[in-house]
Amino acid sequence: MFLAEAAAESTSNFTLFDPFMIVFTILLIWAVIRQVKQRPRNRFALGFAAVSLVVFLVMDGIMISGW
């Protein structure tokens, strides 16, 4: 019984939503790069994309640390 409890605790917290989080983060990286290259720059769009990217990078870090 002790081994079964240890095996149950060692399972990962990977869910099917995790790949979507990574894809959204990649899309946000692409959006920020596009906004930086664009002339004239839309500062609101650049700021919104940058803040969203930071939030998603933090969430990805927390998500990956739970695996």
Image (cartoon, helix red, strand yellow):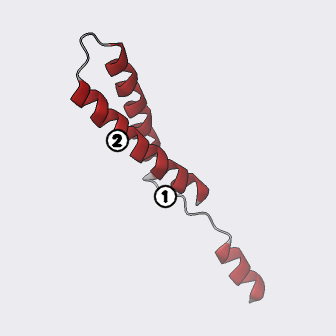
Label 2: few (<14), some or many (≥20) within 10 Å? Answer: some
The disc, 1 or 2, on the residue closer to the chain's N-terminal end is: 1
- Residue at 38% in and 31% down: 27
Residue at the right extreme, as displayed: 3
Q: Is residue 41 above or below residue 8?
A: above
Q: Quadrant of the N terminus?
A: bottom right
Q: Is residue 29 above or below residue 39?
A: below
According to the image, label 1 marks what residue? 15
- Residue at 48% in and 58% down: 15
According to the image, label 2 marks what residue? 52
Q: Is residue 23 above or below residue 37?
A: below
Secondary structure of the residue carrying tag 2 is helix
Where in the figure is residue 6, as x and y percent of width and height? 72, 79
Please state which amino acid type lies under the numbered disc 1: Thr
Q: Is residue 63 left or right of residue 43?
A: right
Residue at the top extreme, as displayed: 39
Secondary structure of the residue carrying tag 1 is loop
Q: Residue 25: in sight, yes or no?
A: yes
The Cα atoms of the two marked residues, 1 and 2, are separated by: 22 Å
- Residue at 26% in and 17% down: 41
